[in-house]
Amino acid sequence: MDAARFTMQPGPLHTAKDHSALEALVKIICSGRYFQRLAPDILRSILRQGSLIKAAKDTLLIREGDTAPPQIYILVKGSVAIISNDKFVLRLNQPGDLIGEMAVIQGTPRSADVVAESECDLVTFPAELLKIEKNSPHASVLYVLFSHAMAAKLRITTAQSLIRRNQRITSKGDIHIGVIDTNQEDRVAAREALGSCWQEAEIMEFDSPRSFLDFPSAYRFDVIVSDVDFFDDFQNDWNSISSFVRSMKLRGAHIIILSKSCNDANRREFLIQHGADDVVGKPCPTFDLKHIISRTRVAYYKNLELDRVESDAETDPLTGLANRRRLDQLLEALVTVYPENQREFSLVMIDVDNFKFYNDNQGHQMGDEALKSVATLLASNLRRGDLAARFGGEEFVIVVPDCGKALAVELAEKLRLAIEQADFPCQEQQPSGNLTVTLGVASFPGDANQLDALLKQADEYLFEGKRRGRNRVVSSDEHT
């Protein structure tokens, strides 16, 4: 059932007589990202210990610094904002999102305000149900069950953050901004404001949502400025608008909606709930638009600098590529987040052919230089958002998000040719007369939907390439 259409009378759920509404509630929360692994019967038992409440817009659910016994909320519908020190931190707007769990875990005063951005339905659980007696070795069943959901929340939130960070730090200094508007004059005005405030950015214009959606999905944007007035009926087209905003978010973008629709408070709320970061009504004074763009630019570079400092500790010292730790973190993040949106990614496993022969004959120092040159060629031929990592020795792995098998094979062939055509010192002494690589390509979830199995499959394709004579790309059991 769609959460937006859910209706149920507020009150304690253990006394609820509308069983169909209770079952609908179970299905809505079960579909959420944090409770998917929980059996419906168990979730139903949890919910019966809580109460359904309705919170009006601007209701303060949690106050920063509050020391009262904590409550946990499960969001059913609506949107809440997390605010700390009067600054917006996070928006929660997905059915099944958890609110207030950190105070239960840490037993400390609340670290932020939680405010309803729109009318919300929530299931709330009183503090005594989650209480653990001092020095007691036992915890309530409810506490233990919520702990699983809390762990899932932390895992997903961390994964999303890692994916966004990888998109930023692989930008190579290029900034991509998209402008989507059917009105040419408005596109020109947005471009001029962007060009004035963000001179180093590459700006792309789209004259319709279709032209944007038809653009290769692997292309990443840092910011998108978009109208939504091209949808004829905002109220009846809400599902299309929600999908459109989500498609922009999947490109990794900070979304600024610049539209006449934003002059309506209810529509602004809807857009914010569905992923927009800023909403601005048309006509918008040039100064106001430039102010929003400048603020976004400052925040972008602050986050980028922090990301790059963190990534320095996750870099292979010889090649400058990501090390095994960063590779493992990104792969775990992708298999955690991508299934929810039915997205795919690919792995390219690469091994330098006859490298031991090269190392033994040219010396380890020359061998190290060859590995550094291979790493440079790999990194320079990737898309933004792709990750090149040293897997170990002379073996490398390329992670290609939002990329199916066919495109990944094209990329692998491009990498193979780049190395085959490069000039390495003394390469003519190699058994094949050249320094080359063999590549195995596996895709998620087509080849495997578990990380270990995916790596194993890519490795098997790589081994098959070696068996067939090296210097080739293998992506299946058939000849490639």
Image (spheres, rainbow, N blue to C red):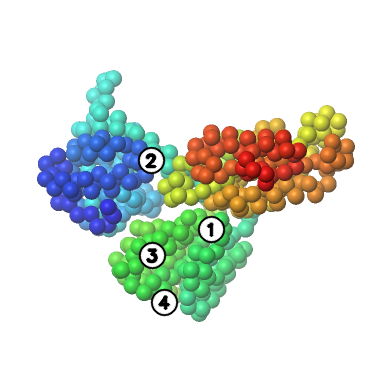
- Which is in the foreground here, disc 1 or disc 2? 1
The answer for how far apart the CA atoms under marks 1 and 4 are is: 30 Å
When asked about the image quadrant of residue 99, the answer is: top left
Dot placed on the residue nearer the N-terminal end, 4 or 2: 2
Secondary structure state at the residue bearing disc 3: helix
Label 2 crowd bin: few (<14), some (14–19), many (20+), radius 10 Å = some
The residue carrying mark 3 is: 241
Report the residue at 67% width, 34% height from top: 463
Label 1 – label 2 distance at C-alpha: 27 Å
Check whether the beta carbons of the residues at disc 4 and disc 2 lie within 8 A of each other: no
Instruction: Determine crowd level at label 1: few under 14, some 14-19, many 20+ residues with C-alpha closer than 10 A.
Output: some
In the image, 197: left or right of 268?
right
Between the residue at mark 3 and the residue at mark 2, the CA separation in whole angstroms equals 26 Å
Left/right placement of residue 227 relative to residue 374 reads: left
The image position of residue 250, as x and y in percent, is: 48, 55
Q: Amino acid at mark 3?
A: Ile
Q: Residues within 10 Å of mark 3 (few under 14, many from 20)?
A: many
CA separation in Å, label 4 and label 2: 40 Å
Q: Give the residue at the far front of this rendering.
A: 478
Q: Determine which residue is flagged by label 2.
A: 153
> Under tag 4, what secondary structure?
loop
Where's residue 216, x and y in %?
56, 60
Query: Which mark lies nearer to you, 1 or 4?
Result: 1
